[in-house]
Image (cartoon, rainbow, N blue to C red):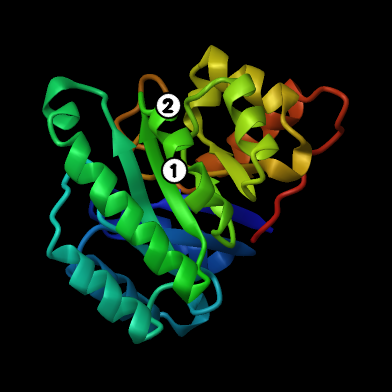
């Protein structure tokens, strides 16, 4: 099975509509990340028009740390109550630049609130963490209560990933084209993590391979091959789903 732990269907189809055929024609399972109610509705309409994708696409929704709008908690609450999402995310913390760092207190507040909602609903969470690993450990007790925690496009170190697991978090670490682009920390983490904790993602259409304008669903095949190459003791990296 081809498993894409994190991609953005609406934005992907806007730049590369042929992606729909890849999803339809392959043994595919993917988590469609949505930041707005409109995006959730877009994915729902896509599935309604393409019923063969109903078992292939799962929807996640969360308040992204780069756009921390507190009123969107009501949207998340509604989507959970209506069983319209399969995961909460992407949520998290982002200190990548001064603009994002300026909202870190609000980010933390919304992160905690969304973790609590996910815990109560027994939903997995998908995390966006950039330059904020220390703050993750501030929330480690809350993360331990979550069913499954996916660190989308994990950019921390192998030691940090190991520490998260050692703190009792049921964590999975997802990797994409950063591996193909030679990201040293990502490569080292893939090399040392337990195999069952590694997931593949494209973040399509974002995070493209070098020299390309956007990432595509079939990038996942190259990413899986790269993981197998990095973990050279494995003849094949097995695709898996949650």
> Residue 180, position in %: x, y?
54, 23
Position of 71 relative to 210 (above/below): below
The N terminus lies in which quarter of the figure? bottom right
Whether tag 1 and tag 2 are in contact, CB under 8 A, the answer is no
- Quadrant of the rendered structure where residue 45 is? bottom left
Which disc number belongs to residue 139?
1
- Quadrant of the rendered structure where residue 108 is? top left
Residue 173 visible here: yes
> Residue 68, position in %: x, y?
17, 49
The C terminus lies in which quarter of the figure? bottom right
Disc 2 secondary structure class: helix
**Is 43 situated left or right of 72 in this image?**
right
Q: How many labels does the image show?
A: 2
> Residue 37, position in %: x, y?
20, 70
- Quadrant of the rendered structure where residue 70 is? bottom left
Residue pictured at 40% horizontal, 63% vertical: 116
Residue pictured at 72% horizontal, 22% vertical: 191
Residue 33 visible here: no
Which one is earlier in the sequence, the residue at label 1 or at label 2? Answer: 2
Residue labelled with disc 2 = 134
Label 2 environment density (alpha carbons within 10 Å; few <14, some 14–19, many ≥20): few
**Is 75 situated left or right of 55 in this image?**
left
Which disc number belongs to residue 126?
none
Label 1 environment density (alpha carbons within 10 Å; few <14, some 14–19, many ≥20): some
**Is 203 situated left or right of 40 in this image?**
right
> Residue 228, position in %: x, y?
75, 31
Spatial CA span between label 1 and label 2: 9 Å
Residue pictured at 23% horizontal, 54% vertical: 14
Disc 1 secondary structure class: loop
**Is 230 situated left or right of 178 in this image?**
right
């Amino acid at each position: 099975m081809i498993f894409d732990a994190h991609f953005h269907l609406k934005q992907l189809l806007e730049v590369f509509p042929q992606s729909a055929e890849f999803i339809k024609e392959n043994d595919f399972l993917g988590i469609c990340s949505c930041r707005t109610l409109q995006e959730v509705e877009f994915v729902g309409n896509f599935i309604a028009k393409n019923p063969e994708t109903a078992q292939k696409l799962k929807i996640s929704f969360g308040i992204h740390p780069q756009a921390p709008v507190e009123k969107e908690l009501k949207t998340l609450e509604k989507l959970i109550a209506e069983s319209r999402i399969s995961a909460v995310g992407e949520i998290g913390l982002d200190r990548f630049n001064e603009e994002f760092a300026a909202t870190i207190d609000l980010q933390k507040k919304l992160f905690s609130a969304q973790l609590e909602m996910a815990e109560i609903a027994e939903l997995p969470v998908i995390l966006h963490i950039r330059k904020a690993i220390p703050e993750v450990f501030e929330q480690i007790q809350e993360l331990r209560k979550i069913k499954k925690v996916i660190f989308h496009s994990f950019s921390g170190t192998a030691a940090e990933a190991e520490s998260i697991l050692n703190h009792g978090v049921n964590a999975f670490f997802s990797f994409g084209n950063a591996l193909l682009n030679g990201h040293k920390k990502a490569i080292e983490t893939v090399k040392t993590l337990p195999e069952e904790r590694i997931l593949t993602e494209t973040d399509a259409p974002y995070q493209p391979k070098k020299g390309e304008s956007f990432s595509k669903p079939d990038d996942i095949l190259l990413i899986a091959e790269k993981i197998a190459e990095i973990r050279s003791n494995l003849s094949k990296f097995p695709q898996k789903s949650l």
